[in-house]
Image: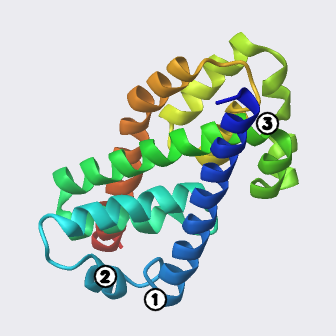
Amino acid sequence: MSVTTTKKILNLISFSGMAVSIILTVYFFQLGVFKDMNALQSLVGQSTLTGPILFIFIQILQVIVPIIPGGISLAAGVLLFGPVEGFIYNYIGICVGSIIIFLLSRQYGKPLVLRLVSEKTYDKYAGWLDNQSRFDKLFALAIFLPVAPDDALCLMAGLTNISVKKYIWIILLAKPASILLYSMGLVYGSSFLTQLF
C-alpha cells in the first residue's frame, strides 16, 4: 500500500470519526444530556458496565466538540458515580479526548484549530507557539491548573513540535489535579458556599 493511499485512508477514518462525534454530540445535546442531570442519569442508566462506558464516551465527545460546557460533565461524573469512580471516569474520558484533539490538530493543522478555537483565544496564546521549550513548560502548567482553556491549548499544542510521547505524559500527569479540583469544586464548593451564606 502506497504512502498516499495510507494517508487517504487515515484522513477518511479521522473525518468519519469526527463526523460521528458531531452527530452523537448533537443527538446527546437534543436529549438534554449536557444541561440536565436527570437526562444524563437516565441515559447513563444504572448499569455498572455500560453506564461508565457511555459516560466516558460523553466526556471524550465534550472535549472533541467544544460546544458543551465541560464543567457540567465533570460535576456529573462525581454526582453520578461518587468521588472516586467519578474522578476515574472523568480522567479517562478527558485524557482520551485531549489526545484525540491533539492528533487531529497535528493532522489538519491551523485551519482546524481556527474552526474550533475562537480567534480571541488563539491570539491570546499564539505567542506561546514561538518558543518550543517555553511552550512545553507553560502548557504543562496550564494543564495542571484548572484555569486555562485546556481544550484550546491541546489543539494549539498540535501546531508545535512537541513530541506525541511528551504531550501524552503531560496530559496523563498534569490532568488529575485540575480534574479533581474542578469537579470537586463544582460539586462540593457550591454546597459549602450555600452553608456559609
Characterize the local packing of mark 3: few (<14), some (14-19) or many (20 or more) Cα atoms within 10 angstroms: some
Type of amino acid at the residue the image marks with label 1? Leu
Q: Which element carries disc 1, helix, strand or loop?
A: helix
In this view of the protein, which residue sits in the foreground, 173 or 109?
109
Q: Residue at x 36, y 56 (%)?
A: 183
Look at 62% across and 37% down and name the residue there. Answer: 103
Q: CA distance from mark 2 to mark 1?
A: 9 Å
Please tell me whether residue 125 is drawn above or below residue 60 in the rendered image.
Answer: above
Instruction: Check disc 2 and report its element: helix, strand or loop.
Output: helix
Callout 2 amino acid:
Leu
Q: Name the residue tied to disc 1.
A: 31
Q: How many marks?
A: 3
Q: Is residue 98 visible?
A: yes
Measured as percent of width and height from the top left, residue 170 is found at 49, 25
At a point 27% along the width and 86% down the height, the residue shown is: 42
Task: Say if residue 148 shows up in the picture.
Answer: no
Q: State which quarter of the image contains the N terminus.
A: top right
Which mark sits nearer the N-terminus, 3 or 2?
A: 2
Q: Quadrant of residue 40?
A: bottom left
Q: Which residue is mark 3?
A: 125
Check residue 43 in the rendering and tell me which mark sits there, or answer none.
Answer: 2
Q: Residue at x 12, y 66 (%)?
A: 48
